[in-house]
């Protein structure tokens, strides 16, 4: 159970860093995407935004899982 907790924390930290980085370089995040449903007139997503949301971001979160798995294996959790 502790192993799953540390993997979850790892994914969370990676997600926070990824969202922060996306905002800095001007790519839309899931928050922007979901808010576009409530206010569709301001929805002007570019191809890179969709590429980020549906391909790159999930891969980064998977790397967060992998990082958490490596840390838990290193500390024998």
Image (cartoon, grey):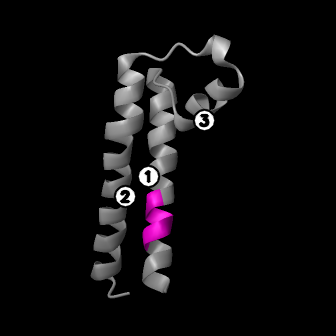
Q: Looking at the image, is mark 1 or mark 3 earlier in the sequence?
A: 1
Picture disc at residue 14: 1
Magenta-colored span:
7-11
Q: Which residue is mark 3?
A: 31
- Magenta stretch encompasses residue 10: yes
Picture disc at residue 35: none
Q: Residues within 10 Å of mark 1 (few under 14, many from 20)?
A: many
- Magenta stretch encompasses residue 36: no
Q: Which residue is mark 2?
A: 64
- Give the spatial CA distance, label 1 vs label 3: 16 Å
Assign a secondary structure to mark 3.
Answer: helix
Q: Position of residue 70 (x, y in %)?
A: 28, 72
The answer to the question of whether label 1 and label 3 lie on touching residues, with beta carbons closer than 8 A, is no
- Give the spatial CA distance, label 3 vs label 2: 19 Å
Q: Position of residue 10 (x, y in %)?
A: 44, 63
Q: Looking at the image, is mark 2 or mark 1 earlier in the sequence?
A: 1
Q: Nearer the viewer, mark 3 or mark 2?
A: 3
Quadrant in which the C terminus appears? bottom left
- Give the spatial CA distance, label 2 vs label 1: 6 Å
Assign a secondary structure to mark 2.
Answer: helix
């Amino acid at each position: 159970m502790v192993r799953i907790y540390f993997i979850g924390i790892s994914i969370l930290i990676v997600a926070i860093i990824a969202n922060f980085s996306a905002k800095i370089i001007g790519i839309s995040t899931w928050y922007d995407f979901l808010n576009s449903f409530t206010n569709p007139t301001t929805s002007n997503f570019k191809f890179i935004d969709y590429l980020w949301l549906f391909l790159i971001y999930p891969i980064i979160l998977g790397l967060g899982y992998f990082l958490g798995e490596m840390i838990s294996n290193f500390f024998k959790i």
